[in-house]
Amino acid sequence: MNSRTRLRLRSLVAFLAVCAALLSRNAYAAESPTRLQGLAQKVTVYFDTYDIPHVYAESWVDAARAVGYLHASARLGQMDIFRRQASGRLAELMGAGALESDKLMRLLGVRRTCEAFWKSDAVPAEYRAEIEAYCAGVNQRIVELTPDKLPLTFQALGYRPTLWEPVDCLVMTKYMGWDQSGTEDDLWFGTMIEKLGADVCNELWPLDRPYELPIVSRQVERQRLPAPGTQAGVASGLPAGLAALYERTFARLAASRLHPRSDSFGSNNWAVAGSKTASGKPILASDPHLGFRLPSLWYAAHVSVRGKNVTGVMFPGNHTVVIGHTDHHAWGITNMQADAVDYYVETVKDDDARQYLHRGQWKTMDVVTEKIAVQGQGEVELQVESTVHGPVVSREGGRVVTLAWPGTQPTSDALAFWKGQRVETLEGFLDALDLIKVPNLNICYADVEGNIAIHPCGSLPVRLPGQGRVPMDGASGDYDWQGMIPSNRLPLSVNPPEGYVGSANGRPSPQGYPYYLGWMWDDSYRTRRMHDVLQTANKVTIADMQKLQYDTHDKCAERFLPVLLASLTGAEMTDPLAKAARAALADWDFVADPEAIAPAIWLRWFEEYRDGVWRDEWARRGIEQPGGSWGYSGNNRREPMLEVLEFLTLEQPNSPWFDVADTAAQETRDDVARAAFGRAVGKLKMQFGDDVNQWVWGKINILRIGSLTEQPELAREGGPVPGTAFTLNPGSNVGHVGGGASWRMLVDFSQPDASLGVYPGGQSEDPTSPHYDDLMPLWAAGKYVDMAAFRRTEQGRREAAERARTFVP
């Protein structure tokens, strides 16, 4: 935003703060009934202390209409930005800086495919009626808003929102499908293959990692699986010499991301069977990890229709609960992080760049013309060209690169969540999950009947052995997708003998599973810590699950640090600061509490150790690594898998990978570790001073959440957070905490009406509202809001409410 907009925004914030202070005494005064056009019967909404609504209606259509009004009242500015971002219309407001993002959304066809789905027969009449009612509720609120009552976003930018359309309800889910499955890493990995060779890449980034634990260890068959096939590491159908093309295409696509993924360190979910709980009923936990913004991605709500209930969190802009529970079952989500994207290098004619070769025939690309409005520049015309593989994302000379992703076709993802909260059997829930196409998700499940399950699901292609990790030749047709993996053959675990299921963005399937699913899983330290606790757990209570969601035992430190510390044994150490740092590490129990000194030392040392092992290898091969990380976690960086480094560190201390290329000596693991320790202490001294006692984790690992519009005036701090980048409750990698558990939820089926939840933010997007950030302190302290979804009758809910609102026809 320009300086004039920033100044206007500051003035508005100050003015609204004064107004809020003057009105605070009457903030919860009784409200007159609101006439909601199209409503069939009265809807009553009770708001709790944190402004979480409990909506009581006589029909789901009436409830959706009321929820639309509530969303527009609390989050209209965010809703408009979300639909613009997903539809490729941000540059219209934010100028050329958002143009590349808009172009990518148009290339992917996010809005076009949602429009096609909405017009199709695949939309059930009930769902269509609810979406239309939701839009009507949003639009009534939009029409009511006078210019001085518009949310801050519209006042600062000087425009009014257009009316809400049904497709607007679908695009955010589809956009999140790309955000959580789209990747440019095939292009990066293609460069690494060319510069390192396939054998080296298969050694450093193997499909089967050391020490990893799969999400599904025993496959439950909804249909008989075919015999296990062969999964070669890397195959290539292209000549050498394309690294420069890959690098430039990668850079362009990476630049289109408005928010990097590096703030997030994975997600967790698990369900514990009644055989391991104190009550004899299952307990489900879910905490999806994302980068944080204010307002939050989530809006919490409870809806009750004639005694049937659903509670959890929604995306503002759609009335469906994405993560939550009903009277019958609960579900939690982690990103499967499967490989859903391929890139193809197409052969085109010299004299007609839209003619491409495929299976021996010249074919003409499909072309769609998109016009993108850019603030201050008028319209930019974009020609979206597509082959049988997908849209063209790069043209350089005679080389054309296309992108294949299941989401370039109409998908039913939003419908899946709606259907999943209406069914009342495990079988029905699994049928609903078959509708999820993008992104690929690990859905954890528990129900009142005692079942637990976990199902990695979504749309993934059937590929040839070795295909999927690098760009492929598009002309021959030999590398085309061979259809999609049948949904009933995707990994599934139901009521396993271990008495629990869970995921932390790890490998979905057991070894021998016949289909290639990917390789970009997170490091397995959260997974291993989860298994450590749940394997031995007994008589589990919801309080135990609170502790596990907030667990700060660093499994990565537990594995590496004893070996690294041993490398310092006998080393001459004259620096008092280095001695103090070593002593702090030696006394540490691997728990990253705010009072601990060791976490910052450990993380800096580990960072320097990793660089010491790999940096010289890239330099001597002329590899200039891009920023960020491969996969979805900032832990991965542009380095080999951490489990590979763990294997080398623990079991091959004299590996040639530890030798430093530009020295005459033959270095070992211990040499690299000692040098890294010295560098780490030096950097910590420069950053935090020469007193180790001041390197307290709680002074470093501070929650700080920026605003959706990136205005510093709207950012908030929330105090110290425990944990590191490797713990179940993630902190930082030495710095502010800007991502992590975006929503923590716990459901105990011995008392499902007493579920717990919290997210870092607040229900309102208004920075002058007490509900802009009032959940942040709870979240940072590991506390929860009692969702109390069904415990009270409507009479009891009214007596407990902070305020109430009634909608009438």
Image (tube, rainbow, N blue to C red):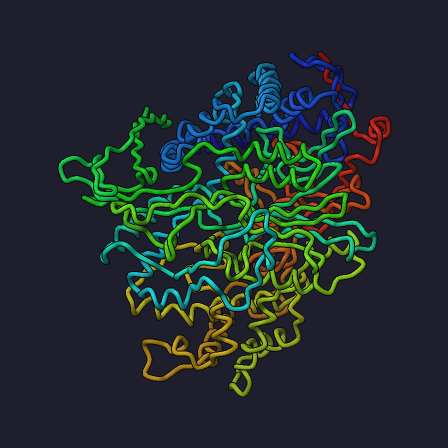
52 to 499, vertically: above or below: above
Q: Is residue 149 visible?
A: no
Give the side of residue 583 with respect to residue 196, left or right.
right
Residue 722 makes an appearance in the image:
yes
Residue with the most extreme left position: 351
Residue occupying image coordinates x 49% and y 35% = 174
Is 698 left, or right, of 608 in this rendering?
Answer: right
Q: Quadrant of the C terminus?
A: top right
**Residue at 52%, 77% in the rendered image:** 650
The image position of residue 282, as x and y in percent, is 75, 50
What is the total number of numbered labels drawn onto the structure image?
Answer: 0
**What is the quadrant of residue 691 in the picture?**
bottom right
| Residue 728, placed above or below residue 605 | above
Up-down relation of residue 807 to residue 85 (above or below): above
Image position of 224 with respect to 38: above or below:
below
* Horizontal side of residue 601 vs 93, given as left or right: right
Residue nearest the observer in this picture, 485 or 326 = 485
At 35% across and 54% down in the image, what residue appears? Answer: 470
Position of 43 with respect to 511 (left or right) is right
Question: For this rendering, which residue is in front, 540 or 105?
Answer: 540
Where residue 280 sits: x, y (%)?
Answer: 81, 52
Residue at the far bottom in the pictured view: 570
* Residue 436 coordinates in the image, percent (x, y): 54, 39
Q: Position of residue 249 (x, y in %)?
A: 31, 47
Q: Quadrant of the N terminus?
A: top left
